Image (cartoon, rainbow, N blue to C red):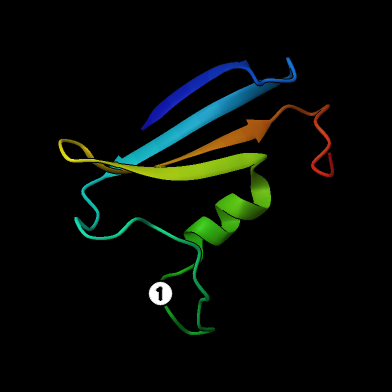
Amino acid sequence: MALSSGSDDRTRTVVHVEVIDDGSAVSLPFVRAATPDGDGGRGLLMVELLSARWGVHHDDETGNAVWFHLPDSTTNHDQ
């Protein structure tokens, strides 16, 4: 996991979080519908709801990475 802070393209402070795991070699993580009694399927939904921006990428050496930006307290999600 990597954690850093900086400014976005609108010069607002953001926290950048990136999580890397081996994941699947054939597909990238995606938001999916979770079943009420299922064990999985909620992580990226929570990332999508709480972050200002997020995305995924794959590297053959390190695996899949999910990154997201947490806005500072002055960021408006509706912009």
Q: Quadrant of residue 7?
A: top right
> Measured along the vertical axis of the image, is residue 47 above or below residue 11?
below
Give the residue displayed 22% in from the left and 58% down from the top: 24
Q: Position of residue 28 (x, y in %)?
A: 34, 55
In this rendering, position of residue 12 left or right of residue 31: right
Residue for point 49% across, 19% down:
4
Relative side of 58 to 8, left or right: left
Horizontally, residue 71 falls left or right of residue 38, namely right
Q: Residue 13's x, y, as percent?
A: 69, 18
Secondary element type, mark 1: loop
User: Which image quarter is the N terminus in?
Assistant: top left
Give the amino acid at mark 1: Asp
Seen at 66% across and 48% down, the residue is 50
Figure quadrant of residue 70:
top right
Q: Position of residue 55 (x, y in %)?
A: 49, 44
Q: Give the residue number, with chain letter if any, for mark 1.
A: 39
Query: Is residue 39 shown above or below 20?
Result: below
Q: Residues within 10 Å of mark 1 (few under 14, many from 20)?
A: few
User: Could you say where residue 10 lies in the image, as x and y percent from the top left?
Assistant: 75, 20
Tell me: 8 left or right of 1.
Answer: right
